[in-house]
Structure formats: structure tokens, C-alpha cells
């Protein structure tokens, strides 16, 4: 079995400040938990708490994977966290559009129903007794009816729900209904996110971003000292999500933000020249 020397892991832990990063993430979690009012209602507040919860979970998982010496695995989760960060930025910009929030929640429900149907079909295929098969069939039929109802709701409005970002609606042009379109229309003006998007395309290998005239050279090797790549993805995305959530709930985040910036600034300076 593949193992990394524990001394190397300890060195990486100190160099990339894993302990302090974990403590700061936990502190942010504690501050929101002290004031958060959880509700089953599908509104902007519940959406913020959901995104924040995922950010906390993903960040802790990524730091754990990194500490155990698997930066490529951490990179996969970090990309997903980055996508969540950009998606939340887009929703925050249009938070007063109730129809957008409704579509977003319906898109989540559609995905959940689809996954449930697939699982129930799998269980039914493996069932042997008649009652279990009948019960599973009834559950599948109910899920399918709910799924069809949501599709019908939007089909009547000429909205296609079979693409990932269909919930954007008519806010963006058809060609921009993708992750890159959301990125360009939200946080692209923040230089750091241009760099992060560049990294997401190339996974840290030395390259040049050819998206625009402001090219950025990336110089990091994920197989050796590339631990900073998923860390930068993670912390920058985590900070962005926290700022949106904490500003909405009027929670102080500046002290945590400043400490995170102090840790990550040296990492970024090593990645791009």
C-alpha cells in the first residue's frame, strides 16, 4: 500500500498551516451557529445556511485529505467548492428575484428525485419477495409523479430543465448558461478568481491562461509541492462564501478573513509569478 513518510506530512502540515486553518474554519462555523435560525422553508436564508454548511464540510475534508498526502484528491473537492462559491455569488447578486430562488430549489429537488428513483429501481431489481417489490414500486411511482410535476411546471414556460444550469432562466443569454458564464458575470472582476479559474483548467501544471489579455503564468507541480493549489482553491472559495453569508446575517468576519489572508498570501505568491 502506498504511504507517504510521516515526517513529510508533518512538514507540510507546518508549512501550509493546517492546524490554524482548521481552527479558523471551526471558528467561522461557531459564529454562524450562535445566531443562525434554521428553517425548513425554501428561502434565501436557508440557501445561505446550506451553502455555508457545505463549505465547512468540504473545507475540513480537503484539509484532512491534504494532511494525509493526497493533493490530487483534495483538488477534486476543492474544484467543487469553488463552483459552489461562484454559484452562490451569482444567486446573491440576484437574491431579490424570487423566481430564480424557486427555480434553483426546484433544480435541487429534481436532482434528489432522480437519484432516489435510480436507487429505488436498483433495490427493486435486487428484491425477491412480492411485498417488498410492491412497496418499492409504489415509492418509485410517487417519486416519478413528483419529478414529472416539476418538469411540467417549467415545460409550460418553455424552460428546458435537462441541463445543469437551467435554473438561471432568462437572466443570462443561452450561450452563458454554464459555469464559465456565471463566473464571468459575477466574480470575474476579482483578480484572484481569474487565477483560480485558470488553475481549475490546468490543475497546477505550468501553463498560460489564454482567456484574455491578462495572462497569468501558473508555476506549481501538484506531484511535489502542489499542496498549495487545493489550499488556495479551498480558502479563497471558503472566504467568498463566508463573506456573503456573514454580511447577510451581520456577523463579524473581518478578523478571520485577515488571518486567512495572512496565511494564503505566501501560497499565492508561489503559484503565479
Image (spheres, rainbow, N blue to C red):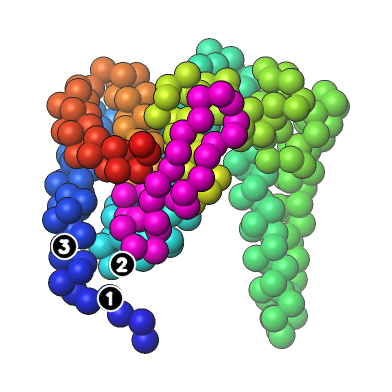
The C terminus, quarter of image: top left
Image mark for residue 23: none
Q: CA gap, disc 2 to disc 1?
A: 7 Å
**How many numbered circles does the render carry?**
3
**Relative side of 184 to 20, left or right:** right
Name the image quarter holding residue 61: bottom left
Q: Which residue is mark 2?
A: 69
Q: CA gap, disc 3 to disc 2?
A: 11 Å
Task: State the SS at label 2.
Answer: loop
In this rendered view, identify the residue nearer to me: 99 or 120. Answer: 99
The answer to which of marks 1 and 3 sits earlier in the sequence is 1
> In the rendering, at what x and y percent does residue 29 appear?
24, 39
Please report the bounds of the magenta region as a residue range. Answer: 204-230
Task: State the SS at label 3.
Answer: helix
Residue found 69% across the figure and 81% down from its top: 127
Q: Which residue is mark 3?
A: 11
- CB contact under 8 Å: marks 2 and 1: yes
Amino acid at each position: 500500500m502506498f504511504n507517504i513518510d510521516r515526517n513529510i506530512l508533518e512538514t507540510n502540515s507546518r508549512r501550509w498551516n493546517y492546524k490554524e486553518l482548521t481552527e479558523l474554519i471551526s471558528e467561522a462555523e461557531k459564529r454562524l451557529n450562535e445566531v443562525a435560525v434554521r428553517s425548513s422553508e425554501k428561502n434565501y436564508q436557508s440557501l445561505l445556511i446550506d451553502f455555508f454548511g457545505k463549505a465547512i464540510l468540504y473545507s475540513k475534508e480537503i484539509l484532512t485529505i491534504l494532511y494525509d498526502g493526497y493533493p490530487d484528491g483534495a483538488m477534486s473537492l476543492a474544484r467543487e467548492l469553488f463552483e459552489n462559491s461562484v454559484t452562490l455569488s451569482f444567486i446573491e447578486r440576484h437574491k431579490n428575484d424570487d423566481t430564480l430562488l424557486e427555480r434553483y430549489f426546484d433544480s435541487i429537488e429534481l436532482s434528489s428525485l432522480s437519484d432516489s428513483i435510480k436507487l429505488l429501481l436498483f433495490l427493486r431489481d435486487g428484491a425477491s419477495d412480492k411485498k417488498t417489490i410492491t412497496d418499492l414500486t409504489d415509492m418509485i411511482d410517487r417519486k416519478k409523479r413528483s419529478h414529472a410535476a416539476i418538469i411540467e411546471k417549467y415545460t409550460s414556460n418553455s424552460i428546458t430543465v435537462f441541463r445543469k444550469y437551467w435554473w438561471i432562466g432568462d437572466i443570462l443569454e443561452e450561450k452563458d448558461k454554464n459555469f464559465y458564464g456565471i463566473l464571468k458575470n459575477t466574480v470575474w472582476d476579482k483578480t484572484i478568481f481569474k487565477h483560480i479559474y485558470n488553475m481549475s483548467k490546468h490543475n497546477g501544471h505550468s501553463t498560460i491562461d489564454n482567456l484574455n489579455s491578462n495572462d497569468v503564468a501558473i508555476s506549481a507541480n501538484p506531484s511535489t509541492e502542489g499542496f498549495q493549489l487545493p489550499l488556495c482553491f479551498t480558502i479563497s472559495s471558503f472566504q467568498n462564501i463566508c463573506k456573503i453569508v456573514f454580511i447577510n446575517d451581520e456577523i463579524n468576519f473581518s478578523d478571520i478573513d485577515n488571518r486567512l489572508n495572512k496565511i494564503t498570501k505566501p501560497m499565492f505568491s508561489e503559484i503565479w509569478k
